[in-house]
Amino acid sequence: MVKIDRLTLKPFHFRLSCFHLFSLFLAMNFIISEAQQAIKKLYNEEVAESVINIQETRKEFEGQVTIVAFPIIRYSKKLPEQTANELGEYLVANVAEVTKFNVVKGFLNLSIAESYFLNLFNKEILSPDFGVYQPNGKKVMVEYSSPNTNKPLHLGHVRNNLLGYSVAELLKAYGYEVVKVNLVNDRGIHICKSMLAWQKWGNGETPESSGLKGDHLVGKYYVIFDKEYKKEIEALKAEGSTEEDAKKNAPLIKEAQQMLQQWEAGDAAVIALWEKMNGWVYQGFDVTYKNLGVDFDKFYYESDTYLLGKDTINEGLEKGVFFKKEDGSVWIDLTADGLDQKLVLRADGTSVYITQDLGTAEKKFEDFGMDESIYVVGNEQDYHFKVLFLILEKLGKTWAKGLYHLSYGMVDLPNGKMKSREGTVVDADELISDMITTAREKTEELGKTNDFTDVEKDELYKNIGLGALKYFLLKVEPKKRLLFDPNESIDFQGHTGPFIQYTHARIKSLLSKAGYVFKTGNQDFGNIMPVELEMIIQLAKYPEELETAAKAHSPASLANYLFELAKLFNKFYHDVPPIVKTEEGEEKQFRLNLCKKTADIIKSGMLILGIASPERM
RNA sequence: GCCUUGGUAGCUCAGUUGGAUAGAGCAACGGUUUUCUAAACCGUGGGUCAGGGGUUCGAAUCCCUUCCAGGGUACCA
């Protein structure tokens, strides 16, 4: 059997970091305790932290931190406005960092001293440890991609691949040891369909002879099978068969089933054909994976795992978790959990999907002993995974609670679902090459790469094209279904990957023109502008954004954060007088430091999304 | 039928444990370049947050209900 080269696991290094990670919320925590004290002094009431409801001040008002007065009026026994005013006066008088306050409709907006934010920026944000999480000692497995070997990858697979890769990177950045796994569905009736069609109508065609990429060649015969199969069904129906009977009795499907039996029996000729055609497919997938920039530490093949799970069935029968029906089939009763009865083994002793998955889950745990395991699989399998996890829990597997189904919505076309058999799919390879071509056209229109070498150009266009594609797919919350209109090209302006990449390149250009050298700044050099204050606050959020995204297994929030950061930077860039031309001094150093840190965060954040940040574009 | 996930501007999407006048981008219209990259920035228009009820100082967010759409529903994977 041909296997994909196992890609070597890249060692990942963690820089030493301080014990606690900076958090904007933590930094603002002192406001909460100060407010609690204020309430004690003013109203003689001890209140819980949860009573002090703080949030970021909305942009249209003055200040940076807002306390909501409504929850406090129970204790002050005064109107919200009055309560807020009294609190504000107390805080300004007694807390050094609070310089001013204003009250709008029961909301107390506090202005925090600039020196506080500058200190934050210089001491915390500029530190090399900022946003770097220490290894947490836990291992997580991310299973994604999981393709069938009878057809090329399409846009739906692309979403899966990018999501899986990015979640793996995200968890790595959050301190996990990560194992990326691909469970390849390399056997079954669907593969026999392609094989049979090739045998009948292929005339010995190969990737070399046809010039087709291996997976596309095999996919072509999958479509041919379906076409011929449909013809037979129609013919049978014309002779009076019902649709159902026709589907069952068509000669082609019978032949395919027979071929599957021969495969299972180890028939040498069938196995040889299977190996040959799967080999073509793997060669094709390898190219697509490389273009997408995704990789795996371990491949599992269903041809190796499809017989697993029988032991688990016996174990379940012994433990009384499963029961046997008269015909010999094995079931689990999940009605007490609000689900149905579920078959776990057929009467003839053969496996169903969930049998294999039970066995494979055990095998994966034996192989890696991970603490958590994430399955990146479409939402059509929500029920399957719910049942799978529940069964493993009932079997008393201690690791079952670490299992998580990262369910994502389908990618739909304007006229509905993609169907490989009917050829209504957005092909992954085609889409990738279209994106790169578009990136080339747009960039050359702007005349920005005239002094690039051909190699540099190729790399840049690939980075931009894929940046646009990846960002387009990753910015949307995974569980939402996603609409893709092939007639409308993916944007390169606005809320897009290239916009963020552009921002990074812009900063890099600025830094090099300014001859930037890193140096921590002093705290006082005059007034900082509102947009600079906003920048500090936005940068300060990065570690929390990583944490939120990692805990939610969702790169989307990180993607949106990076866009907000880039947008804010461009406003800053526009509002601030040209930095390069400013005379040397604290202010210039501070601004350059802001630029540098923004570029660093964009670069590392985008890397988590699997998107490169070019130095120039 | 039952279970489940969605429904926010013309389109594509944000909206963290309930907080202020619901935000971006695209598209449309108008403006900004002898100053660090205009893939940028600024402005205008665009909304019954699917409908209805409830909880409360306050609801896109929580609860109930109706409608619409996707997915699942015992021997496909």
Image (cartoon, coloured by chain):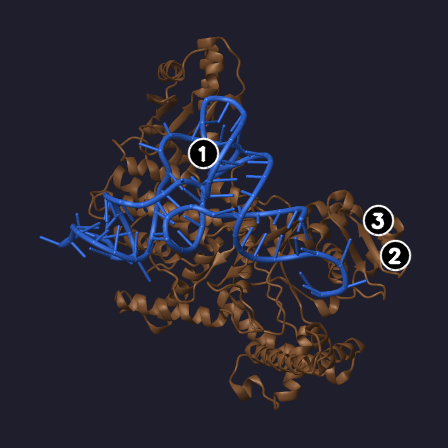
Chain colours: A brown, B blue
Query: Disc 1 vs disc 2: Cβ atoms closer than 8 Å?
Result: no
Within 10 Å of the Cα at label 3, are there few (<14), some (14-19), or many (20+) other Cα atoms?
A: some
Please name the residue shown 78% across and 75% down the image.
Answer: A264
Which residue sits furthest bottom?
A203
Of marks 1 and 2, which one's residue comes earlier in the chain? 1
Badge 3 is on which residue? A321
Residue type of the residue flagged with mark 2: Lys
Q: Mark 2 lies on which chain?
A: A
Residue A200: name its quadrant.
bottom right
Which residue sits furthest front?
A240
Q: Where is residue A530 in the image (x, y as percent from the top left)?
A: 29, 35
Q: In this view, does A479 lie to the left or right of A128?
A: right
Query: Disc 3 vs disc 2: Cβ atoms closer than 8 Å?
Result: no
Q: In this view, does A130 lie to the left or right of A205?
A: left
Residue type of the residue flagged with mark 3: Val
Of residues A474 and A79, the one drawn nearer to the viewer in this rendering:
A79
On screen, residue A243 above or below B70: below
Q: Mark 1 lies on which chain?
A: A
Residue A452 seen from this side: yes
The Cα–Cα distance between marks 3 and 1, rounded to whole angstroms, is 48 Å
Of marks 3 and 1, which one's residue comes earlier in the chain? 1
Q: Where is residue A441 in the image (x, y as percent from the top left)?
A: 32, 69
Dot 2 falls on a residue whose secondary structure is loop
Q: Is residue A1 left or right of residue A436?
A: right
Residue A601 seen from this side: no
Badge 2 is on which residue? A325
Q: What number is the disc on residue A24? A: 1
Of residues A337 and A305, the one drawn nearer to the viewer in this rendering:
A337
On screen, residue A417 above or below A85: below
The Cα–Cα distance between marks 1 and 2, rounded to whole angstroms, is 59 Å
